[in-house]
Amino acid sequence: MQRLPLITPERERIIFQSVYSKARDLGTTLHAVGGIEDHLHLVVSVPPTLAISQCVKHWKGASARAVNRSGGAGERFQWQRGYGALTVGGRCLSTVIEYVKRQKQHHRTGNLFSVYEET
């Protein structure tokens, strides 16, 4: 899978806002969002009544529509197909939240947790 660097700083702001808004609409709790130019990580508590696949569909759809409505320069924005999902909880949750919040720093320094980056 080829990741393309399509998330500009302007797009990132729009994407983060729309993902937070859609998470609230879905009744999920978005703990953290972080990413770099070619991918995004979310730490989300999803109630058992919702399918992860449907949540991802809504987050991707809402954020792509928001970016494309913004009228910024560049080609039409769309997410690549697929996604990865891991479950975390308990003692690991705060560590994963901090990791995701510092995505840019981790990628700059190469201090990555491969299990989070290869999914």
Image (spheres, rainbow, N blue to C red):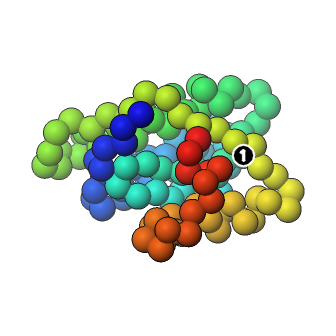
Residue 90: which quarter of the image?
bottom right
Q: Residue at x 46, y 57 (%)?
A: 35
Task: Tell which residue pokes out farthest to the left in this image.
Answer: 73
- Assign the N terminus to one quadrant of the image: top left
Q: Residue at x 69, y 42 (%)?
A: 86
Viewer-proximal residue, 7 or 48? Answer: 7
- Assign the C terminus to one quadrant of the image: top right
Judging by the rendered image, the residue that carries numbered circle 1 is: 45
**Image spot of residue 66 (x, y percent):** 33, 41
| Secondary structure of the residue carrying numbered label 1 | strand
Q: Is residue 14 visible?
A: no
Q: Answer left or right for 9 relative to 84.
A: left
Q: Amino acid at mark 1?
A: Ser
Residue 25: which quarter of the image?
top right
Callout 1 crowding tier (Cα within 10 Å): few <14, some 14–19, many ≥20: some
**Image spot of residue 71 (x, y percent):** 17, 45
Q: Is residue 15 visible?
A: yes
Q: Residue at x 35, y 55 (%)?
A: 37
**Image spot of residue 89 (x, y percent):** 81, 52
Viewer-proximal residue, 91 or 24? Answer: 91
**Image spot of residue 77 (x, y percent):** 27, 38
